[in-house]
Amino acid sequence: ICGAISAYNSERAEPGPRNLAMLISKGLTLKGFTIPSYQQYAPEFFREITPLVTSGAFVFDETVIDGVENAFDAWQRLMHGGNIGKMLVRVTEDRSAADTERAGSPARS
């Protein structure tokens, strides 16, 4: 981490994470990434994950809140740990288009 020594004995808080200097003492590596950097792996990922999801072998949890009028409540629950897995707000009445009863993942409220 370049420039970390400049923060030693500083009387003011430095911008950024408070414990970034611990990367040095713990011998850690910090590497940023973005999804577009790995887009070349998308076809292989979907080829492998699709059968696992449809067969029920890949199980995940989700909390589904019905109605856009309840979106704020869903957000509050998300911020306070009131959800299991992914928080979703169902905004359609068409169950065939937005069926949350995915293979191996029953919808939770």
Image (cartoon, rainbow, N blue to C red):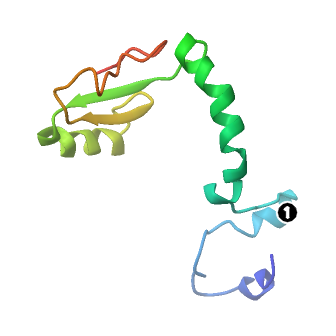
Identify which residue, 86 or 73, lies in the foreground: 86
What residue is rendered at 34% in x and 19% in y?
Answer: 107
Q: Is residue 17 left or right of residue 87?
A: right
How far across and down, in percent of the image, does residue 97 sit? 29, 27
Outermost residue, left side: 69
Residue 34 in sight: no
Q: Is residue 74 left or right of residue 43?
A: left
What residue is rendered at 61% in x and 18% in y?
Answer: 51
Outermost residue, right side: 27
Task: In the rendered view, tell whether residue 55 sits above or below residue 87.
Answer: above
Q: Amino acid at mark 1?
A: Ser
Within 10 Å of disc 1 (Cα), the crowding (few <14, some 14-19, many 20+) is few
The N terminus, quarter of image: bottom right
How far across and down, in percent of the image, does residue 109 sit? 28, 22
Residue 47: which quarter of the image? top right
What residue is rendered at 24% in x and 21% in y?
Answer: 95
How far across and down, in percent of the image, does residue 91 sit? 20, 36
Identify which residue, 69 or 55, lies in the foreground: 55
Q: Is residue 70 left or right of residue 25?
A: left
What residue is rendered at 69% in x and 27% in y?
Answer: 48
Identify which residue, 71 or 51, lies in the foreground: 51
Residue 92: which quarter of the image? top left
Label 1 sits on residue: 25
